């Protein structure tokens, strides 16, 4: 197989890598906004001390590991 044939097959796959890397930087327990993977995440504008913040609202689709959904309605950072 020539270099050009290999490149033609691999180039479209390589284009997907940055998107996959960016998605892995977001916690999969939340959707609607990118909740960063960090030691602690708080709602922007709230009383939390970070070190990371998220603009809400975010839907909790897994475990609410950062306790963003204080009222338990399935939506975090909504107040």
Image: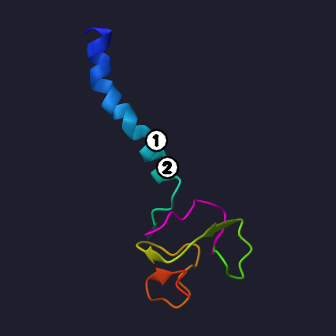
Mark 2 Cα shell of 10 Å, populated few (<14), some (14-19), many (≥20): few
Locate residue 14 relative to residue 77 in the image: left or right: left
Residue 22 is labelled as 2
Span colored in magenta: 31-42
Residue hosting label 1: 18
| Residue 38 drawn at (x, y percent) | 63, 61
| Residue 74 drawn at (x, y percent) | 43, 83
Determine the secondary structure under disc 1. Answer: helix
Determine the secondary structure under disc 2. Answer: helix
Which residue sits at x=44%, y=89%? Answer: 73
Which residue sits at x=26%, y=15%? Answer: 5
Say which quadrant the C terminus sits in.
Answer: bottom right
| Residue 46 drawn at (x, y percent) | 67, 81
Q: How is the image coloured?
A: rainbow
| Residue 11 drawn at (x, y percent) | 34, 27
| Outermost bottom residue | 71
Say which quadrant the N terminus sits in.
Answer: top left
Q: Main secondary structure of the magenta part?
A: loop
């Amino acid at each position: 197989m020539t270099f050009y044939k290999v490149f033609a097959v691999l180039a479209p796959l390589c284009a997907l890598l940055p998107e996959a890397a960016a998605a892995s930087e977001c916690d999969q327990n939340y959707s609607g906004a990118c909740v960063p993977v960090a030691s602690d995440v708080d709602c922007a504008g709230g009383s939390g001390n970070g070190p990371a913040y998220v603009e809400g609202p975010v839907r909790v689709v897994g475990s609410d590991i950062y306790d963003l959904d204080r009222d338990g309605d399935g939506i975090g950072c909504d107040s």
